[in-house]
Amino acid sequence: MSLQTLLGIELPIIQAPLAGVQDSALAIAVSNAGGLGSLPCAMLDAAALRKQVELLRAGTSRPFNLNFFSHTPPVPDEDKARAWRALFADYYAEIGLDPVAQPAGAARLPFDEEMAAVVCEARPAVVSFHFGLPAPALLERVRATGARILASATTVDEARWLEAQGVDAVIAQGVEAGGHRGMFLSEDIATQVGTFALVPQVVRAVRVPVIAAGGIADAQGVRAALDLGAAGVQVGTAYMLCPEATTSALHRAALKSESARVTALTNLFTGRPARGIVNRLLRELGPMNALAPQFPLAAPVVAPLRAKAESLGRDDFSPLWAGQNVSGCREIGAGELTLALARLV
Amino acid sequence: MSLQTLLGIELPIIQAPLAGVQDSALAIAVSNAGGLGSLPCAMLDAAALRKQVELLRAGTSRPFNLNFFSHTPPVPDEDKARAWRALFADYYAEIGLDPVAQPAGAARLPFDEEMAAVVCEARPAVVSFHFGLPAPALLERVRATGARILASATTVDEARWLEAQGVDAVIAQGVEAGGHRGMFLSEDIATQVGTFALVPQVVRAVRVPVIAAGGIADAQGVRAALDLGAAGVQVGTAYMLCPEATTSALHRAALKSESARVTALTNLFTGRPARGIVNRLLRELGPMNALAPQFPLAAPVVAPLRAKAESLGRDDFSPLWAGQNVSGCREIGAGELTLALARLV
């Protein structure tokens, strides 16, 4: 069965869920063009998710994807938290923030009973997971709705594990991809694999369709991914300049600059490795810092600093998420971009 | 002009120079099949190189490539050398090696006047460089022989720099590639780029033909690289099981095992980051160790340990060079493999 038939879409193009820089508007535009629009749900509470699903249902009659995180919730460690805050003390002082003021920042919650209940009401055509899968009973509730289930693999071992849990397709996320690595059987970024090497090996290792992600930015890239055996692609970075994305002006400017060609995996913003443009924070603390607490507990310390700096027009402390190939970013409608991506399919 | 016309070859397939695991036999087989065979020269002295060139001339009338390193020779630092030796003291004791016995190991010399003289005699069709380019006067001597000049770029900036120096084509080496990273304008492996992202961006940045390298292992991979805009490909890992390669039995066994899927960039073997299969040494010292002296001064400490362990049938201390995609390794003749790689061109 083709990926299009499996997911009920016309084009083998999945818009990657972009937590923090999109809402339902981007997903609607992609789904209406024949691709699969995705809504990132990990930073929404149940009420906000219901609202976004209403908007999705009002905006499109086509399939869409709800994306959730499935990490293990962290065990707070006060010593680590203190060391992490101390690392930022000079930045807080520099920018004039009270060190005890600790707004919670955007929470990132794993998929749970409450979200499962919303999925049961919303009945999306597709549900995708990042950082592994939820517990079997929760996953079964999703499956029982009839939703197709996708999940990210960053290695052959992760792809095999996901297939054994019964996912309908595997997203092979190459190391080029922007945002969070979906890795869940390893924490070692040194052994993460590029798209060109990952996709063919995952295709040989599993029987379910494989969706290529990471570095795919234009029609030639889509064509190349299909040549490597992928059944479809997931594209994120290329959509970030679309008017339907909520990408900030500072983030848009960074994506359009020469500096966008230099990205790194960093755990500074959340505690888990995610790819973003190298900016002041990454340069000064190192992109991977051993003091970072467990995901997502790094975030509340960086968030107020980022907010204050952004209010001053500075992106020094912003997570400038981007993949390694920004050459496909275009300031055109997401529907038009979706059609352009599928031009050589 | 096509890459084939530029280099005088029939197929847009370049066999990557594989220092330590091949000699002229592999290059001859590839050139005779219509690809471009390469001879790694950095570990040869002038007499050994002359001998290999004689064999090449006797074995093929087709174009071949002589590959050289163009690193800046290191400044020995006795403190660093001592710390590096100390790190290996327990391994030496474990395996029964005298800690003061320090055989020099294989030297890796940058391209110099003596090698330029051999090139002037040998008149190869193609000369390629890794780690940047030699000084302008030396490069001019090579150019004056009529040889086409290739060099490796790992970023867009490096590709632009090489084009400005007048190279005839740029090898865009994605992070998937096995062996040494060709990086020379940056030392930061955190910002190295995957093939899928690097190739299209280099293609947009330079006017000379771009040769894709890293993760390309079979005809589908070659096709995909051409889709991304490459004029040809350079393939290394896939050739390592060919009978014409001098890959050791231990190395061959590792390439055929499941462990070959887990590789990392490591500076343990030479001082410069190079990709190999994760084995005991990488696990225990960490693949990138801050104590490693400047390239190639790390090598003489590891070499005797490796030799002793290999004599005992153990690959614990061997550089098991491999790219991230071993799925194309086949135990067939290198000529047949070359034709198979070009099947979808």
Image (cartoon, coloured by chain):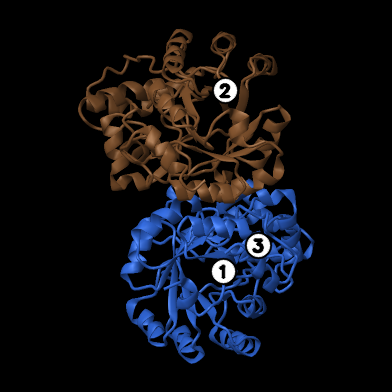
Chain colours: A blue, B brown
Residue A309 higher or lower than B113, as above or below: below
Numbered badge on residue A238: 3
The residue nearer to you, when weighing B289 against B177, is B177
Tag 2 residue: B127
Q: Which mark, residue A13?
A: 1
A141 on left or right of A101: left
Residue toward you, A194 or B226? B226
**Residue at 60 percent of width and 62 percent of height:** A344
Q: Residue sitting at 63 percent across and 71 percent down?
A: A103
Residue type at numbered disc 1: Ile
Given contact means CB atoms under 8 Å apart, are the residues at marks 2 and 3 in contact?
no
Q: Is residue B73 left or right of residue A283?
A: left
Q: Residue at x 63, y 53 (%)?
A: A325
**Amino acid type, residue under disc 3 in the picture:** Ala
**Is the residue B196 above or below the residue A301 in the image?**
above
Chain assignment, label 1 = A
The Cα–Cα distance between marks 1 and 2, rounded to whole angstroms, is 42 Å
Residue A134, x across and y down, in percent: 39, 75
- Identify whether B187 is placed above or below B201: above
Q: Toward which corner of the image does residue B250 lie, by quadrant?
A: top left
**Between disc 1 and disc 3, whose residue precedes?**
1
**Residue B315 can be seen, yes or no:** no
Residue found at the very far left of the displayed protein: B312
Within-10-Å neighbours for mark 1: few <14, some 14–19, many 20+? many
Q: Are marks 1 and 2 on the same chain?
A: no
Q: Position of residue B308 (x, y in %)?
A: 25, 23
User: Left of B194 or right of it: where is B304?
Assistant: left
Q: Amino acid at mark 2?
A: Val
